[in-house]
Amino acid sequence: MAMMIVKDECTSCGDCQPVCPTGAVLKKKGTYIIDAEVCTECEGEFDEPQCVEACPVPNCIVEAA
C-alpha cells in the first residue's frame, strides 16, 4: 500500500517532503504528490507514516485505495 495526498486538501506547505525517508513525496505543478511505487508507508522504519505526522492539515494524507 502507499499513502496519497488529497489534492483539494493540500496547502502545498511542503512539510511532508523532507520527512519522507524514501523520497516518495514530490512537488509537481505547485502541489505535492506521493509516488506510490516508492512509498512504503514508513513500514519497518517508523510506527506511523512520517508525512502524516508532519502534515498540519487533518485527513490531507490518506492510504491510497
Image: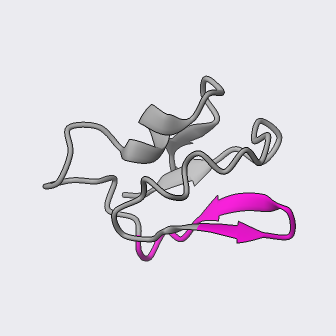
- The residue sitting at the left extreme is 44
Q: Is residue 15 magenta?
A: no
The part of the image, by quadrant, that contains residue 15 is top right
Q: Point out the stretch of residues depicted in magenta.
A: 26-38
In the rendered view, would you say 35 is above or below 31?
below
Out of 41 and 18, give the one closest to the viewer: 18
- The residue sitting at the top extreme is 58
Name the residue located 49 percent from the left edge and 37 percent from the top edge. Answer: 54
Q: Is residue 34 magenta?
A: yes
Out of 50 and 59, give the one closest to the viewer: 50
Name the residue located 79 percent from the left edge and 58 percent from the top edge. Answer: 31
Q: Position of residue 36 (x, y in %)?
A: 49, 68
Q: Is residue 55 left or right of residue 44?
A: right
Q: Is residue 60 left or right of residue 11?
A: left
Q: Position of residue 49 (x, y in %)?
A: 36, 44
Quadrant into which the N terminus falls: bottom left
Q: Is residue 7 left or right of residue 45?
A: right
**Label tally:** 0
Out of 48 and 12, give the one closest to the viewer: 12
Name the residue located 42 percent from the left edge and 58 percent from the top edge. Answer: 20
In the rendered view, would you say 19 is above or below 47?
below
Name the residue located 57 percent from the left edge and 40 percent from the top edge. Answer: 61
